[in-house]
């Protein structure tokens, strides 16, 4: 019987050798700065590198890493426009190409930044992970992208979730046309800049973004990260804050 895969299998032996530069002492050198020792490079464009992840911690996956810059302390929210477009073009093209590869049931495309993001390396990077057995959309509902509109431009909608996936503040971008991906990139950059510089009294130093491709529409969910609430961890109950309007008024007045 062929069961739909519901879980990813974490390989602890692979993980044990993985370098950490995010929450640890400074004497751990950054593996992404040591370019001469990087192997399995698939694409190089100036300071941008796409390569196979040296530590495939998840079974039945093909993990790639996109190193966004040669500046270890850089951040996506600070990139000049041309560099942002180059990084996002490479990432989105690779993600969509892997989606068409019959070896994969689905493909994850995500980014971690900051100590609460779940990432291990500070150096700016994104991850594109082909899943051989699991459909990453199985727990996702279109309602997770519904929200109070913040901005609309060039067929891209930005909103803040009214029915969040996990809880609190989730910013959604919905791109209905492939021709609007640079608008999408700019709106991701604005949202991330807002989160790191002006959101909730500058309390946020970590975020994730996640991409989804459902029925020809590209969705991106950007989540400011704090310690995850126990009510979600234990009961899967998402929580909705009562000040969404206040948050989005602040965002709009500063950025749009
Ligand atoms: Zn580095």
Image (spheres, helix red, strand yellow):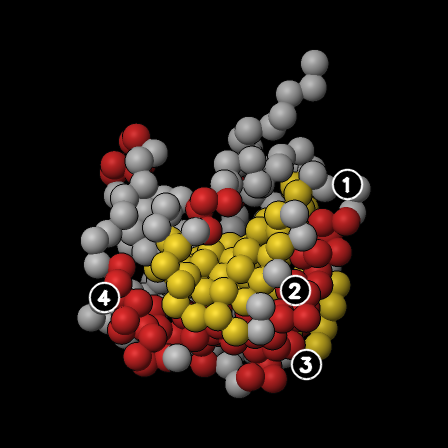
Q: Which residue is mark 2?
A: 177
Front position among marks 1 and 2:
2
Front position among marks 3 and 1:
1
Q: Is residue 139 left or right of residue 170?
A: right
Question: Residue 193 bears which disc, if any?
Answer: none
- Return the disc, 3 or 1, that comes first in the chain's sequence: 3
Q: Which residue is mark 1?
A: 103
The secondary structure type at the circle numbered 3 is loop
Query: What is the spatial separation of the Cα atoms under label 1 and label 4, in whole angstroms?
Result: 45 Å
The secondary structure type at the circle numbered 4 is helix
At horizontal 21% and vertical 53% (from top left) the residue drawn is 242
Q: Which residue is mark 3?
A: 46
- Return the disc, 3 or 4, that comes first in the chain's sequence: 3
Q: Which residue is mark 4?
A: 246
Vertical side of 162 occupied by 68: above or below: below
How many numbered discs, if any?
4
Query: What is the spatial separation of the Cα atoms under label 3 and label 4, in whole angstroms?
Result: 41 Å
The secondary structure type at the circle numbered 1 is loop
Q: Residues within 10 Å of mark 4 (few under 14, many from 20)?
A: few
At horizontal 78% and vertical 47% (from top left) the residue drawn is 101
Q: Residues within 10 Å of mark 3 (few under 14, many from 20)?
A: few
Q: Residues within 10 Å of mark 1 (few under 14, many from 20)?
A: some
- x and y percent of residue 135 in the render? 62, 37
Q: Residues within 10 Å of mark 2 (few under 14, many from 20)?
A: few
- Return the disc, 1 or 4, that comes first in the chain's sequence: 1
- Return the disc, 2 or 4, that comes first in the chain's sequence: 2
Query: What is the spatial separation of the Cα atoms under label 1 and label 2, in whole angstroms?
Result: 26 Å
Front position among marks 2 and 3:
2
| Quadrant in the rendering for residue 93 | bottom right
The secondary structure type at the circle numbered 2 is loop
Query: What is the spatial separation of the Cα atoms under label 2 and label 4, in whole angstroms?
Result: 30 Å
């Amino acid at each position: 019987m062929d069961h739909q895969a519901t879980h990813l299998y974490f390989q602890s032996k692979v993980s044990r050798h993985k370098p950490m530069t995010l929450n640890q002492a400074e004497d751990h050198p950054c593996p992404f700065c040591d370019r001469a020792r990087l192997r399995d490079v698939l694409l190089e464009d100036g300071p941008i590198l796409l390569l196979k992840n040296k530590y495939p911690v998840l079974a039945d996956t093909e993990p790639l890493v996109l190193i966004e810059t040669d500046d270890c302390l850089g951040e996506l929210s600070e990139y000049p426009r041309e560099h942002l477009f180059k990084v996002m073009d490479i990432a989105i093209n690779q993600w969509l190409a892997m989606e068409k590869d019959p070896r994969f049931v689905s493909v994850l495309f995500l980014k971690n930044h900051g100590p609460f993001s779940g990432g291990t390396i500070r150096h700016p990077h994104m991850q594109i992970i082909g899943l051989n057995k699991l459909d990453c959309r199985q727990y996702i509902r279109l309602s997770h992208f519904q929200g109070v509109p913040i901005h609309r431009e060039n067929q891209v909608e930005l909103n803040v979730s009214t029915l969040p996936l996990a809880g609190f503040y989730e910013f959604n971008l919905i791109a209905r046309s492939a021709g609007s991906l640079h608008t999408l990139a700019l709106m991701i950059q604005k949202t991330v800049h807002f989160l790191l510089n002006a959101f909730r009294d500058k309390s946020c130093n970590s975020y994730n973004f996640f991409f989804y491709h459902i029925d020809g529409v590209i969705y991106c969910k950007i989540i400011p990260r704090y310690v995850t609430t126990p009510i979600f961890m234990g009961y899967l109950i998402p929580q909705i804050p009562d000040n969404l309007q206040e948050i989005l008024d602040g965002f709009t007045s500063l950025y749009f």
